[in-house]
Amino acid sequence: MKFRLQTIFVCFAFFAPLFFRPAYASPDPVNVKGPEACGECHKNEVQAWQLTAHFSTFNEMHRRPEARAIADKLGISRIKSESLCLNCHYTSKEIDHENQVIAGISCESCHGAAKAWIDVHNDYGKGFTKETEPAEHRDARHAKAAAAGMIYPENLYAVAANCYQCHIVTDEKLTNVGGHTAGSADFNLLTWSQGMVRHNFLQTDNKSNAEATPEHKRMLYVVGAILNVEYSLRAVARATEKATYGITNAHRADAARKELARIQSLAPTDELAAIIAVANGAKLRLNNGPELSAAADKIADLGREFASKVTGDRLAGIDSILPGPDQYKGTPYQISAVH
């Protein structure tokens, strides 16, 4: 499937308020279709997903001793029924008027609950297929699906935000009481997206799982750094006591701000300068929630603007600091010769 990126970015910018929300929850079970609905067309993507920790958490996470220990400290008897766990570790769907866990972290965890957009996404026009669909119809279809809640990969800031809202813990009780880590300390959008979770088959007509281009790698790295600042600030804003959660995230936010400054020194842009100014103006201290939240909201707006306006070719100066394939998180899935 080939995208007219300029047209789509315009559509995303217009519809962003409709489907980008700095929320802290898994997809609404009422609107979830389930990974099997995506797998009807995206078979390679589902096979790649089935080899990831995102998939295996469905059967394994609640059985791990460390998970049970955290749950016991929090007074949680059933991990698969408690929102503190469900929000980031599982996908739920309403079945017979009851919410049931159906998968681990799945397609809709990143791309949005599909009930309202999946039929639009699959409609290539009467008498047409994916290969023969007119460009005008395709562009209109993408815009309509985005307006209905689908988060396309091209909407980089929105889809990546779904990573950070879980890889930076959103409830301080999980950390301060339960002993859960305050977040994935080594989480990096570039190294994690290019590892085991990579499922980029469309660009090669399903012949291989393509690695990101150099230009896109730069965008992944910088957008990830912006999101790291945004969600670290949100975490500090939620902290109510001087304890592990607040202290860890304050350190994370400070380090993230310094990383943005390093990026700016190597590949300066006006867009990133505006983000840095907001980030540096926020005071990392306890009981400063309104100021920190307002700064995070502003960074989210500026971050979406950065992702829609700046192109990877403008960021070539950061190539010297980009992590290489040896640092990718896990091994990317590839189609076997007999597939």
Image (cartoon, rainbow, N blue to C red):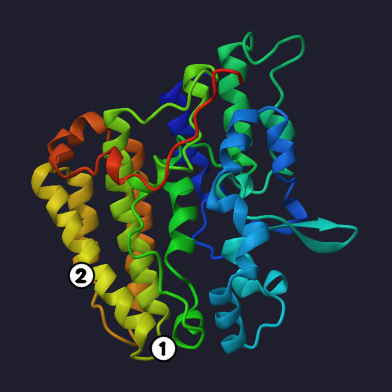
Image vertical order of residue 123 relative to residue 274, above or below = above
First in sequence: mark 1 or mark 2? 1
> Which residue reaches farthest right?
96
Relative to residue 85, is residue 94 drawn left or right?
Answer: right
Q: Which mark is residue 281?
A: 2
Q: Which mark is residue 240?
A: 1
Where residue 178 sits in the image (x, y, percent)?
Answer: 51, 84
Question: Residue 103 or 95: which is nearer the viewer?
Answer: 103
Where residue 128 sits in the image (x, y, percent)?
Answer: 71, 10
Relative to residue 318, is residue 38 drawn left or right?
Answer: right
Indicate the amino acid at tag 2. Answer: Gly
Q: Is residue 304 visible?
A: yes
Where residue 269 sits in the image (x, y, percent)?
Answer: 17, 42
Question: Residue 93 or 275: which is nearer the viewer?
Answer: 93
Where residue 116 sits in the image (x, y, percent)?
Answer: 72, 43
Relative to residue 158, is residue 231 drawn left or right?
Answer: left
Q: Quadrant of residue 127?
A: top right
In three-dimensional space, the C-alpha distance between marks 1 and 2, rounded to whole angstroms, equals: 21 Å
Question: Residue 174 or 21: which is nearer the viewer?
Answer: 174
Indicate the amino acid at tag 1. Answer: Thr
